[in-house]
């Protein structure tokens, strides 16, 4: 359980990576299938490997988004912790 990402450990989200990614009204790329055509950068792959190995490359962030397709401002009341590739992370 210690190796799980912080957002999987959080009581705000389901307790598995699959549960978090497929949660209703979350992660539009999972809902619309766009994740199948994603081309992650080396930096994004590295961060994903770190997270799966129990290292938190996000600064304890619980939320993230990609600003290029996103048009909402829900993140404006949160603290930006880091940017990995095109994704901005917040807590």
Image: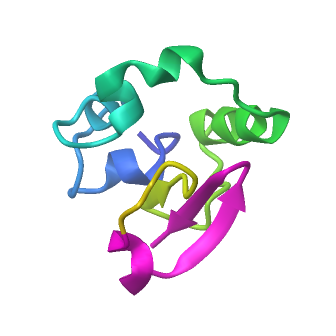
Task: Please report the residue visible at 41 percent of the width from the left and 31 percent of the height from the top.
Answer: 29
Q: Is residue 82 magenta?
A: yes
- Image coordinates of residue 24 in percent, x first then y, are 16, 36
Q: What is the magenta range?
A: 73-91
Q: Viewer-proximal residue, 42 or 60?
A: 42
Residue 91 is left or right of residue 26, and the answer is: right
Q: Residue at x 33, y 23 (%)?
A: 32
Q: In the figure, is residue 60 to the left or right of 86?
A: left
Number of marks in picture? 0
Looking at this view, is 27 or 8 the one in front? 27
Image coordinates of residue 57 in percent, x first then y, are 67, 55
Image height of 31 relative to 47, above or below: above
**Colour theme:** rainbow
The quarter of the displayed image where residue 43 is located:
top right
What residue occupies the far right of the structure in this picture? Answer: 42
Q: Is residue 45 above or below residue 7?
A: above
Name the image quarter holding the C terminus.
bottom left
Considering only vertical position in the picture, is 16 above or below 76?
above
Q: Quadrant of the N terminus?
A: top left
| Residue at x 50% of width, y 82% of height | 79
What is the x, y in percent for residue 63?
42, 60
Query: For the view shown, which residue lies furthest in the left direction?
Result: 24
Residue at image x 37%, y 72%? Answer: 73
Along the horizontal axis of the image, is 9 left or right of 59?
A: left
Residue 8, image x and y in percent? 36, 45
């Amino acid at each position: 359980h210690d190796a799980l990402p912080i957002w999987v450990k959080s009581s705000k989200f389901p307790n598995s990576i699959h549960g978090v990614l497929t949660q209703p009204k979350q992660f539009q790329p999972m809902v619309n299938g766009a994740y199948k055509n994603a081309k992650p950068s080396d930096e994004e792959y590295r961060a994903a490997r770190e997270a799966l190995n129990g290292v938190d490359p996000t600064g304890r962030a619980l939320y993230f988004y990609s600003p290029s397709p996103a048009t909402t401002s829900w993140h404006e009341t949160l603290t930006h912790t880091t940017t990995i590739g095109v994704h901005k992370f917040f807590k």
